[in-house]
Amino acid sequence: MTELGYNIFMHQLLPFTFLAAFASLFGIAWIVTVFDPQKAPWYIFAGFDALLFTFVFCGLGCLLYFVRTKFYKRYDPSWYFKTSFKMAFFVALFVASVAQLTASQVLNLFNLFGVILAVGLFAFWSYLGKK
């Protein structure tokens, strides 16, 4: 695929990521208002975690992309697309991990530092580990 075709393809995906972010937000609102956390089955918590990850990943990715392309026009839009969604992935991974630890009622300081360390090392490897 050529570079121009790749840029057009990425811009075609942005409305779908925005749509996925707000669809998952409605799913999160439905789970929070309908289900009792004490009696909810395990797959409700897994669905909540997946919807939370999708909302943060798509919403923050779109927001970072639009803000960065609006104020900084120094680089290629495809570079902004890749890096914005890469940053959003790690934030979403952290938020979803902490939400899952909270839902299973095992969140403490040690586990929080473990999640910070795991996501931080994964992000460090992702950004600097490639040659």
Image (cartoon, helix red, strand yellow):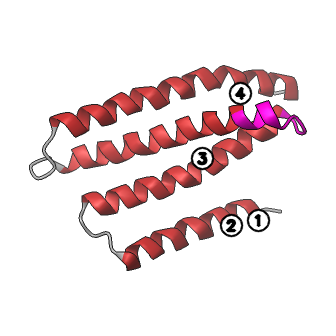
Determine the residue positioned at 39% across, 74% down: 111
Mark number, residue 7: none
| Residue name at image x 77 percent, y 21 percent | 8
Q: CA distance from mark 3 to mark 4?
A: 16 Å
Above or below, 39 against 110 in this view is above
Callout 3, which amino acid?
Answer: Ala
Q: Earlier in the sequence, mark 1 or mark 3?
A: 3
Q: Residue at x 80, y 35 (%)?
A: 71
User: What label sits on residue 125 in the rendered view?
Assistant: 2
**Residue annotated with mark 1:** 128
| SS label for mark 4 | helix
Q: Name the N-terminal-most of marks 1 and 4.
A: 4
Q: Within 10 angstroms of label 3, few (less than 14), some, or many (20 or more) residues?
A: many
Query: CB of mark 1 within 8 Å of CB of mark 2?
Result: yes
For label 3, the residue is 88
Question: Which residue is labeled 4 in the image?
Answer: 10
Q: What's under tag 1, amino acid-wise?
A: Leu
Any magenta on residue 48?
Answer: no
- Label 2, label 3: how far apart the Cα atoms are: 16 Å
Q: Which is nearer the eye, 34 or 53? A: 34
What SS does tag 1 mark? helix
